[in-house]
Amino acid sequence: MFAFSKKTVLALASAILLTLGIASVSSAGQKLRVGYLVADQLHHPALMIMKQRHLLEDAGFDVTWNEFLAGSYVMQEMSSGTLDFAVCGVAPVAIAHAQGVKLNILASGNQEGSALIVSNEISSIKDLDGKKVGTPGTGTIQDAMVAQLAKDNGIRARRMSMKVSDMPLFLKKGEVAAFIAWEPHVARAAANGFGKILYTSREMMPGHQCCVLVAPAGKVQSAPETVKKVMEIYLQAYKWFFDHPEESIQMVMKATGISNHDIIKEAMTRCSYPARPYCNEKSIAEMVGGLIATRKITGITQEQVPAFTEELYNPAFVEELTGTKRP
């Protein structure tokens, strides 16, 4: 787990990525279309740093940055061929891949980092039986976690899709009894006294994969040197995140519009950033299995999940550039 006070983690990240250089392929004038989620920078800090520090532009790329409200919208753009790279949750990526939008997950953005916050009147998960619970929508890992939590506890939660940025106000006004969202929205709602955290995603699904860096499989196959160069810059930004914790917090504050330093720092404790940005492959497979079970993915059997996951997840660039093997 990422912790700003642990020098050993910082030293490890620095040692792994210290010798990274820029690939020899020319990027002068190459157009890149990059997508990311609004106010979600805690979950993709490397891309945030790439954007705010103009790392792709400095390497010669002509970049168009595109902001989206949810991963499903990112996948719509991927399916139309108007994005080259993006970060979003792994669940919509898996759904899109199953629907024929062939994709490669290249690296982790983060693991964990969400939480279920309930109104102050709620004492236990059983109290949510029949109550409205806000989620980012069908196909998101957050929605899936609430569905599984309700099933495990024998209750029926009335899941309602809504914008994550609106959730704290809905909870405050009593229009939902709870919501599940990615940080820092939960930390902000708790700090304002709108409710209390009942479960973190670490408790619901330990080590689960959250956001990922993804690219069309066709681009990975047709332009591997360009993808490699982008990945080198991504890894450099990831290292910078570990090496500059306070500046990273300030960047997150700027990107999310949340000016409270303590809220951002608290939210970061619920996110996990492994020193090497490999994905939790087992978690991805489990998530795909859950999406099949709930019929959000069809046409694929549970027996086909390992092959599906192997096709989707491509850690080859991280392996080559860090000189390590996937866990």
Image: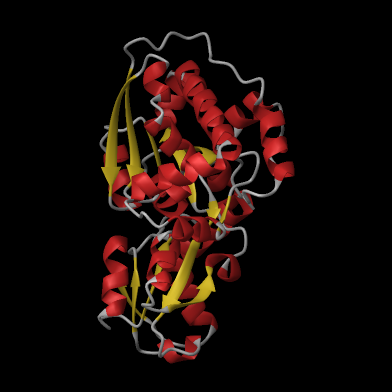
Going 55% across and 47% down the picture, which residue do you hit? Answer: 309
The C terminus: image quadrant: top right
Going 48% across and 68% down the picture, which residue do you hit? Answer: 115
Relative horizontal placement of residue 205, taking residue 133 as reference (left or right): right
Viewer-proximal residue among 278 and 253: 253
Residue 258 appears at what percent x and percent y? 35, 55
**Does residue 179 appear in the picture of this structure?**
yes
Going 35% across and 30% down the picture, which residue do you hit? Answer: 84
Count of numbered badges drawn on the protein:
0
222 up-or-down from 162: above or below: above
Residue 143 appears at what percent x and percent y? 40, 67
Residue 256 appears at what percent x and percent y? 35, 50
**Does residue 99 appear in the picture of this structure?**
no
231 up-or-down from 262: above or below: above
Q: How is the image coloured?
A: secondary structure
166 up-or-down from 176: above or below: above
245 up-or-down from 267: above or below: above
Residue 277 appears at what percent x and percent y? 60, 40
Viewer-proximal residue among 294 and 241: 241
Relative horizontal placement of residue 76, taking residue 8 as reference (left or right): left
Q: Quadrant of residue 11?
A: top right
Relative horizontal placement of residue 147, taking residue 19 as reference (left or right): left
